[in-house]
Image (tube, rainbow, N blue to C red):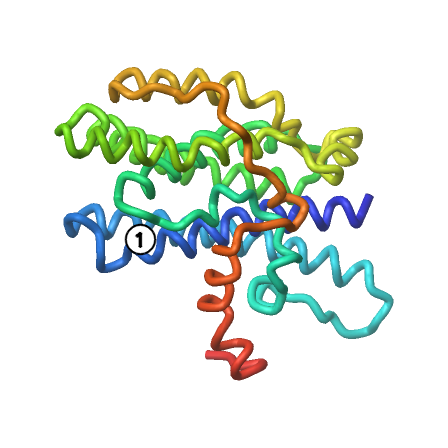
């Protein structure tokens, strides 16, 4: 079970880290100052979630190794793992595109994350419960903020509506993976540790439809799903993200502030 738990915690951490890294690219580039600050703060919230999961994963890894010195830290897990080792869903590694695409990705993932953390608070793993209880307060705001923007853009001008439709077309094929359980999730479900993400989809669709209806947007039908991220199979985009994010630590090993 320990390997499955490590993989599960890394999956949760990787989702948060990569989304935070992508959203943080808007710092200094947001459409208006207030929203620039808002998405930067949201990025920091999500990064904090990633740190909590990485710290727990490092603890689990170190406990499983029969050596006197701990070798895993939150930094080594973020900066010294290769693309194939990351278990994030493909959705979070998609390029930012324009403001509409970034907003839609955040809404879709925050909607999922809210439901995930709500259920994770009933896990038999006390550490996961504690992380989820703290994170859901942040995600509640992320979901509300991104929902308002989806409505604002979808039901706004002809141009903003078109951009939201384009964003939906690009992003929707990557949504189904959120609700597909990986092997390590299935194993932990037997111990009532992980969340059965397949059970979250109906409530996620209900919330998404409600926001889309208000935004005069339509959910696509019969879209071929893109999957593989949870098992370490990623788009080429993740390689570019990691190359930028990990450069300093790899160029100057063991650097600290």
Q: Is residue 96 left or right of residue 156?
A: right
Q: In this view, does 255 lie to the left or right of 101?
A: right
Instruction: Check the picture and name the quadrant holding the N terminus.
Output: top right
Q: Residue at the right extreme?
A: 66
Q: Name the residue under label 1.
A: 40
Q: Where is residue 6 in the image (x, y as percent from the top left)?
A: 72, 50
Q: In this view, does 248 lie to the left or right of 166?
A: right
Q: Position of residue 157 (x, y in %)?
A: 13, 29
In the image, is residue 111 above or below residue 222? below
Residue drawn at x 57%, y 47% is 88
Residue drawn at x 29%, y 21% is 217
Q: Which of the 4 image quarters holds residue 68?
A: bottom right
Residue drawn at x 22%, y 31% is 162
Q: Is residue 115 left or right of residue 100?
A: right
Q: Which of the 4 image quarters holds residue 212?
A: top left
Q: Where is residue 155 in the image (x, y as percent from the top left)?
A: 19, 24
Q: Which of the 4 image quarters holds residue 116?
A: top right
In the image, is residue 67 above or below residue 89? below
């Amino acid at each position: 079970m320990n390997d499955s738990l490590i993989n599960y915690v890394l999956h949760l951490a990787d989702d948060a880290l990569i989304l935070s890294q992508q959203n943080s690219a808007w710092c200094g580039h947001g459409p208006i100052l207030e929203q620039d600050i808002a998405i930067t703060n949201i990025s920091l919230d999500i990064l904090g979630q990633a740190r909590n999961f990485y710290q727990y994963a490092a603890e689990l890894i170190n406990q499983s190794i029969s050596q006197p010195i701990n070798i895993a830290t939150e930094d080594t897990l973020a900066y010294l793992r290769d693309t194939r080792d990351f278990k994030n869903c493909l959705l979070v590694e998609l390029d930012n595109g324009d403001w509409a695409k970034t907003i839609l990705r955040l809404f879709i993932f925050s909607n999922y994350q809210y439901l995930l953390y709500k259920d994770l608070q009933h896990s038999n793993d006390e550490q996961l419960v504690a992380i989820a209880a703290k994170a859901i307060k942040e995600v509640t705001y992320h979901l509300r903020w991104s929902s308002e923007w989806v409505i604002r853009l979808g039901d706004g001008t002809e141009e903003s509506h078109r951009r939201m439709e384009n964003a939906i077309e690009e992003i929707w094929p990557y949504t189904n993976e959120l609700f597909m359980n990986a092997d390590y999730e299935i194993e932990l479900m037997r111990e009532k540790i992980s969340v059965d993400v397949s059970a979250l989809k109906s409530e996620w669709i209900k919330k998404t439809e409600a926001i889309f209806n208000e935004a005069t947007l339509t959910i696509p039908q019969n879209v071929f799903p893109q999957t593989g991220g949870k098992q370490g199979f990623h788009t080429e985009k993740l390689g570019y993200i990691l190359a930028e994010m990990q450069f300093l630590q790899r160029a100057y090993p063991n650097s600290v502030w």
